[in-house]
Each structure stands twice: as structure tokens, then as C-alpha cells.
Amino acid sequence: MDMREKIRVALAELFPESAPLVHLEGEGDQEVPPRESGVLVTDFTKHGSHLDVLCRPDQVVPVAHIMDREGFFLEAIAGVDWLDKQQFEVLYDYNRLGGEHCRVMVRTRVPRNEPVVPTISAIFPAADWHERETFDFYGIHFQDHPNLIRILLPEDADFHPLCKDYMP
Amino acid sequence: MTVPIHLRHDETFVLNLGPQHPATHGVLRVKLTMDGEYIVKAEPVLGYIHRMHEKMAECGTFAQFMPNTARMDYLHALAFNHGWALVVEKAAGIEVPERAEYIRVITVELNRIASHLLWWAAFLLDLGGFTPLLYAFDDREKIIDLLERVTGSRLTYCYMRFGGVYNDIDEEFITGTRDFIKRLRGRMPRLYHDLVTHNIILIKRIKDIGIISAEQCRRYGATGPVARGSGINYDIRKNEPYSVYPEFDFDVPVFDEGDSMARYMVRMHEMEQSMRIIEQALDKLPDGPVMGKSPKVLKPEAGYYYSAVETARGSLGHRLVCDGGKNPYKLKLRSPTFSNLSLYGEVAEGMLLADALAFMGSLDLVIPEIDR
């Protein structure tokens, strides 16, 4: 079985058909058809990733465990502020160091007034700095992070500049 | 009057390295907890040259961000140009003429050699060797002159456009590049390898120092020469081919030792491979336009886009989120040294301070790219 299919099957187990899918209202500004699965195969030449995984915040850690087991590494963590939906999105990019090429984008959404996501820094130490950066820029709180302090902005900064409603 | 310092064995002190320290090549600060000469804990402190490029990207149009890209990794600026051009072309579906892609590859690879030469010079300067810097800068100057001829700038290039490049190369550039390759190949064995690579002082300073395992690279997401020095055969140009790289025959140097010497050797061999790519690209250079059709106002479809390129320091990723507007809704820059540096604390533990500085040099840090 090829790598992409293997990962798709492994991740699909986290999304049983009985469980409701994450509410997907309004990605961007366009009407999107309802999503039928948590794990979608995407066109690599168009989007640059093979799988698009949308999960609940409490599924971030199980997903990271699967990626770790399959020998992936964490490229980056990014935040996105969907101001009109009052949501923050956290994007995890996974990739493999050699072998069959497989890029996986994992994303989760949290309410803007209570942005809490569990940390994956115990699984991937790479996440430590990336989570600190996302906290720095958006104020997203990574639960159980060992050292969630500012990384790029001054330690006494009291703002999160990548929030869309941030006014300098 | 000097007061003798008596340290108990279990007593440690904090040593502040930087942010203004010549070995950190910019404004990186490392908070070191020391037990005598040995490092108990090393904690890099970032952000001294943070400029919030990601917010600048959101506030301007796609084209307006192009000059910013060169100001992150100022040593391999063309690769950052290339990465940004590729992700936007992917999102907006812009076609690039073949000649333009060839020119992109030629200039990016020239820039890669310049970057490695400057790393080599600065690294040896850290270790106390001054003369190599003069040789490396002599050769690097030739590259900078060539690139200045086509791009108009010497360091912070803004050469690429969505759909091509801004200026065609001419006969003088082509002959100049061929002469440069001949010259560097002639100088490499004696001035670079005999004088430095085989030098017993260098070998004693960096061999078996700062050993990074392949598993550490994976857990911390280290890429580029750092990963290839630890036995990981991973190069975006081969593993995830972009542009016209599949057309060229080149090798990916991989060394298994994982020490500073291995990373040194990877970069030295990469220069030769870059020269091979440039030669083949010049031989095969097709005729035609250097700019394709590109709309005046770019409005990519809403969605998520990712594109990666191999810079001199590793994998540079652009995670672009579009909402259908004419500005990027979100741009995350996955800069290679940010991840490469994050393993510093774990590896530097237990090292002598002088070794930890040699190890830091072997990571090839460019601070504006870490801090963005």
C-alpha cells in the first residue's frame, strides 16, 4: 500500500462516520460544498499538499502521534484569523524526509474568544518554537506547553499583531 | 586586584552570549548556563531583528511583497524570490516560459555558491582563520558582479516576477559565468581544500563536534545541509522537483557522520553540484521570452496553497491562505534556520563553550531569516 493511502486510512480511523464533522461554514468568502470526510485527498500540483485533514482541537494530539509513528516531521505551525467567523484556525504542515513524497496539512478551528489547543511539543520538539510563535502572533493558547512565552516580539508586548482586528 | 573565583562543582552561572557577539553573525542571543567551561543549558533568545514580514504580506498586494523576500535571507535572496514567485504562480495558475525558468535556476544556483562561499569565510573567521575570507570574498565578488549585471542589485535582489524574470541575460553574462566556473574549479583544490579542508587545525576543531542524529533532525524538522550532514538524503530539488531541476543531472551530497565536519563537507560538495547545474543550464538554455502573461491584478482562488524550495540553508516553505481578494489573507514563512536552530539547545548541552561556537557556525545561521 502506498504511503498516501496508508496515512489516509490511518487518519480516517479518527473520524468514524457516526461522529459529527467539524462545522465548516465559510472557508474564505466562498460557498463551499459540505465536506463529506475529515480526511480529504487534494490535488498536489494545485495546492501543494496531498491530504487535507480537518479535525477537532482534541484530535490534534492523536493526529500528531500517527504522524510521528509513520516517520513524518513537522514543517511548521501557522495560525489564521477568520475574523468574520470569529474563529482562529491552526494549521500544521507535515512532511517526510525522503522516501515517498507525502505532504499532509492538518487544521483545526477554535473560537476566537477562547482559543485553546493542546500542545504537540512533547511529540515533536519542533512544535515548541512554532507554537510559541503562533501564541506570540495570535494569542492562541497551547495547553500544557512547557514554556509558552513570547519568542519574536519583545517579552513585554501586550498585543498580538497578526489578529485581523489589531490596530497599531 | 583580582579576586579568585571558586566554583563548587554543582554551582553554575549564566553567561550571556550576544545579541552583539561576532560569532552569532547578527543579533542572536544565547542564554548559557555554564558549569565552568561546560554548557549545562543553552537557550537561544530570538527576535532582535524581527520585522513582521508576515503582516507586511497581508497588508500589501502579492507583487508588493516581492522586495521583502530578499530581505529575509540576504545571502540566498534569489531562492526566496523564487519561492514566493512559485507559490503565487501556483495559486493564480500563471505559466512561466521555459527560458525564464532556466534563468531562474542559473541565478539561484550562482547565488547558492555565493552563499556557501560567505558561510565558509565567516565560519573560518569564527574559528580564527582570517586568510580564507580573502579568497572566498574574491570569488564571491565575481558572482555578485555577474548578478548585479542582470538583476540590478548586489545583495537584496528583486529579480523575479510572477510569470518570469524581469531582465534577460546576455552574452557577456554567459561567458562571464563560464569563466567564473572555470576559475572557481581551478582554485578549489588548492585554495579551499589544501589550505583549509585538509588542515589539521580545522579538523581538530570541528571533527566529532556537534553530532546531530538523523532522528534529531526529524524531530526538530531540520533540513538542508544540516540534515544531509546527518545521513538524510533529502533535497527538495530532487524529492519534490520544482522549476526545471528535473532536467539536470546532479548529485545530492550526503554525509553520515552528523558532526560539524560533515556539514562542512556537504556545503563544499554542493558548490560543485551547483556549478554542474549552471553549466548544463547554460548549454541547454532555450530561446524565447522571459516573461509570460500575467494579469495586472492578481486574485487567486480562495484556498490553501503550499510550495517549498531548497535554499542554501534548507527547505523554505510558503503556506499561503487566500480568500479570493487581491492581498494574501495569510502567509506563513517556514524559514529553514528557524527549525535548524531549534535543536541547538539539545545538542549544545554538555559541550565546551568554544566547541559550541564552532557548532553554531556549522549551522549556517542567517538571523533576519530566523526572526523574519
Image (cartoon, helix red, strand yellow):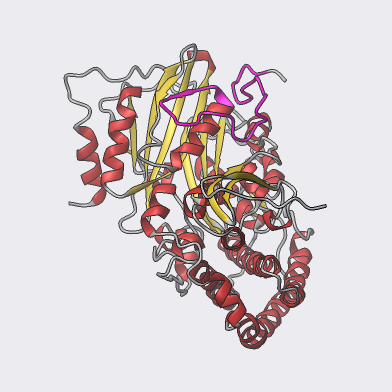
Q: In the image, what residue occupies the spot 46% across and 58% down?
A: B236
How far from the left and from the top, in percent, is residue A163?
59, 21
Q: Look at the picture and state if B214 lies above or below B113.
A: above
How far from the left and from the top, in percent, is residue A74?
41, 44
Q: How many marks?
A: 0
Residue B1 forms part of the magenta stretch: no
Can I make out residue B38 in this image?
yes
Give the quadrant of residue B38.
bottom right
Q: Look at the picture and state if A14 lies above or below B17.
A: above
Give the quadrant of residue A55.
top left
Q: In the image, what residue occupies the spot 48% across and 14% down?
A: A85
Can I make out residue B280 in this image?
no
Q: Is residue B131 left or right of residue A100?
A: right
Residue at far top of view: A113
How far from the left and from the top, in percent, is residue B155?
75, 58
Q: Which residues are magenta?
A: A137-166
Q: Look at the picture and state if B45 lies above or below B287.
A: above
Q: Is residue B1 left or right of residue B358?
A: right
* Magenta region, main secondary structure: loop
Q: In the image, what residue occupies the spot 68% across and 33% down?
A: B56
Classify the position of the C terminus of chain A by image quarter: top right
Q: Is residue A80 left or right of residue B172?
A: left
